[in-house]
Amino acid sequence: MSRATATRLRLHDLQLAQGNRTVLEHVEGSFRDGAITALIGANGTGKSTLIQGIMGMLKPIAGRVECSVPRERRAWLPQQLALDLSFPMSVEELVMTGSWPSHGALTGYCASHYRRGREIMARLGISHLAHRPLGELSGGQRQRALIGRTLMQEAELLLLDEPFANVDAETVDVLMTVLRDMAQAGATIIVVLHDMEQLARLADEVVLLASGHVQWSSPDAVLKTQAPHAAAASLSIAMPGVGTC
Amino acid sequence: MLALLHEWLIAPFDYGFMRRALVAGLALSLAAPPMGVFLVLRGMSLIGDAMAHAILPGVALGFLVAGFSLPIMSLGGVLSGLLVAVLAGSVSQMTGQREDAAMASFFLISLAAGVMLVSLGGSSVDLTHVLFGSILAVNSTALILIAAISSLIVVILASIFRALVVECLDPLFLRGQGVHGGLVHGIFLGLVVLNLTAGFQTLGTLMAVGLMMLPATAARFWSKRLEGLIGVAVGIAMVASSGGLLLSYHLGIPSGPAIILLAGVGYMLSALLGRHHSLRARLQRQAAPLGAPEPH
């Protein structure tokens, strides 16, 4: 388990359930500020459940989540299918909605907001798509736009659920660079990953989920026991005391 | 020529009842189409129809209690519309039945209950009035009520606009910000009910939904942007309202159906000739060459 020096997100003996089924229990630990933590585990081990619990969308059965990041600075990037792609919204408009939580519902955007939005789109390489409807984007372009929204939001806690699934290699590089920059600026980033190569490139810390429990580890320790390029779902992740998944 | 235009377009509004009808129609045309646009975007096009039926028992009860008093009938309509929405939502939540199925069941019950209530207390003329409205009979009290409700709807819609957009596009983002999507959805449905209540005096409970939905469905053929959709829908509704009134005046046909039929003509023309996804657009469709500038 990591013993972070600076943290704004702690889990205290957390127990989470979906319906009547307990998915995770006795989850204890903290996520370090400025670090990228990878959540890994086989399908159904509770990665998305843990994210929902941290975001406050799933009420714990027991224990609690202690988070001192303001709500408007918390961002959750779910898998892309959560978006209604038929909604008439352009890339620029999607990015601009990131400023909505802190900006308020009634005030219009000013020139500086639009300027920042354009800077963010340039950083993500999607300036040329600014006016294109979301429904006409590729998976990678959409993911860049969604990350743009979190940048606009100035997210200090960012939870990403398989952000590199069905995304081209160039987009993976761009997104990893942006996430690394955000972490260096102090953001706490939690990413659900399946790919060990991506884990090796991105993660500072690792949380292993298996059999309803979690264990903090390091990328090196995980990679020593895993073959590169393999999906965690298909591998046996050793967790002392809780068996394997 | 000018005299002819004046006689066709301006002279009818020398009459007070035509002026009041025009103002009522334009007020409704400002408030109703934006609601319709959101209903279409949320895949809830038929919910407006269901809610239109849902207000009927309340309107009928108001009629039984206070006679043809628009404020009392409107209040009854709002209450019964909200009650049906809550009941349908509750049944859906408690039984797991889809909300549209629960809503369909309740609106049929509402329609039957409403028709029964009006028939018990009035004549077939009253029933026709409640079901199909009478825009030419709008008096000053009704006009103030319609204008006030329409203004309120526009103000509330503007207040929740961003939340509504985000809730439509990505409800999880909204929930992540601590805003319960159900609250936004509930306020929105409340506005739909309020809107239909404002419209029943002019177009009747059954046709008030026409001014909400037809311009909105037509607008989908003209714009791919939300602001564009709302602007086009309001424009079509305004043309249909004023044009329908004029047709009604000159041809001696019922005003409510004339307005809705004109909106229907707008929809048909849009489906045939619109810029996006219309029959014409499909026939003319050509792929842009690589490197062509992005269409805005």
Image (cartoon, coloured by chain):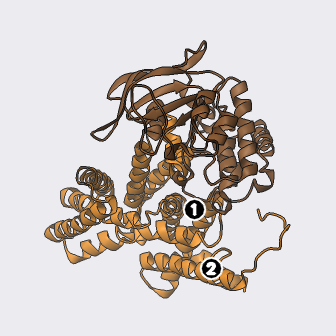
Residue at image x 86%, y 67%? B291
Which residue is the site of mark 1? A86
Does A204 sit left or right of B291 as displayed?
left
Q: Nearer the viewer, residue A214 or A152?
A: A214
Nearer to us: label 2 or label 1:
1
> From this viewpoint, is residue B155 visible?
no
Q: Residue furthest top?
A: A5
Q: Is residue B210 left or right of residue B115?
A: right
Where in the figure is residue B125, as x and y percent of width and height? 25, 76
- From this view, report whether residue B24 is shown above or below residue B187: below
What amino acid does circle 1 point to? Ser
**Residue at 52% from the left image edge and 37% from the top image edge:** A40
Circle 1 crowding by C-alpha within 10 Å: few under 14, some 14–19, many from 20: some
Task: Residue under label 2, please give it.
Answer: B278
Q: Amino acid at mark 2?
A: Ser
Q: Nearer the viewer, residue B237 or A42?
A: A42
Q: For chain A, what colour was chosen?
A: brown
Q: Position of residue A162 (x, y in %)?
A: 57, 45
In front here: B296 or A81? A81
Please, which chain is the residue tagged with disc 1 on? A
Q: Position of residue A215 (x, y in %)?
A: 48, 26
Is disc 1 placed on a helix, strand or loop?
loop
Please name the residue shown 60% across and 39% down the image: A106
Q: Secondary structure at mark 2?
A: loop
Q: Quadrant of residue A192?
A: top right
Can residue A209 be seen at all in this image of the molecule? yes
**Chain B drawn in what color?**
orange
Point out the image quarter for the N terminus of chain B: bottom right
